[in-house]
Image (cartoon, rainbow, N blue to C red):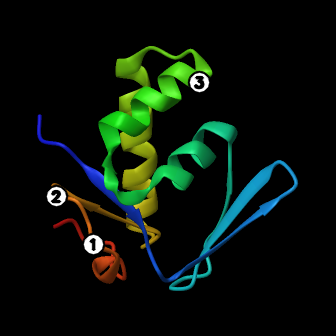
């Protein structure tokens, strides 16, 4: 299995409103209200942390089986990528390359 790296797009607005994280794509104005688990993934999407490490954090924090945490995280970031909200790559993503959502 090759590693995946995810990075938040620069074409996204995000805000934490109380206990809720909300993100919006500037490309199509899609609005997402994130669950606690999704917010952990979103906040860790720095382009340099592998998805497997992010899933381990989710597994530990929310007491979810590691395999299930990874599958769910992968499904979530794939959905965000379809809206241009994150970029997915097999290599770390430098800050200058975060403007698109196409897989590298």
Q: Mark 1 points at which residue?
A: 94
Sequence-wise first label, 3 or 1: 3
Q: Answer above or below: position of 37 versus 68.
A: below
Distance from label 3 to label 2 (Cα)? 26 Å
Does residue 23 appear to the left or right of 44 in the view shown?
A: right
Q: Residue 91 carries which label?
A: 2
Q: Residue 25 at what x, y percent from top left?
A: 56, 77
Mark 3 residue crowding within 10 angstroms, few (<14) / some (14–19) / many (20+): few
Q: Residue 92 at what x, y percent from top left?
A: 22, 60
The quadrant in which the C terminus is found is bottom left
- Label 3 sits on a secondary structure element that is helix
The residue furthest right is 18
Q: Answer above or below: position of 59 versus 25.
A: above
- Label 1 sits on a secondary structure element that is loop
- Label 2 sits on a secondary structure element that is loop
Q: Residue 8 at what x, y percent from top left?
A: 45, 67
Does residue 11 appear to the left or right of 61 in the view shown?
A: left
- Look at 24% across and 48% down and name the residue there: 4
Q: Residue 61 carries which label?
A: 3
The quadrant in which the N terminus is found is top left
Q: Answer above or below: position of 4 versus 62.
A: below
Does residue 69 appear to the left or right of 25 in the view shown?
A: left
Sequence-wise first label, 3 or 2: 3
Q: Answer above or below: position of 17 versus 12.
A: above
């Amino acid at each position: 299995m090759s590693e995946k790296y995810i990075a938040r797009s620069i074409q996204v607005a995000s805000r934490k409103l109380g206990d809720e994280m909300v993100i919006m794509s500037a490309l199509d104005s899609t609005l997402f209200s994130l669950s606690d688990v999704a917010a952990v993934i979103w906040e860790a999407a720095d382009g340099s942390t592998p998805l497997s490490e992010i899933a381990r954090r989710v597994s530990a924090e929310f007491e979810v089986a590691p395999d299930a945490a990874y599958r769910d995280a992968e499904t979530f970031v794939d959905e965000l990528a379809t809206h241009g909200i994150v970029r997915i790559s097999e290599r770390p993503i430098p800050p200058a390359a975060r403007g698109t959502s196409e897989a590298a």
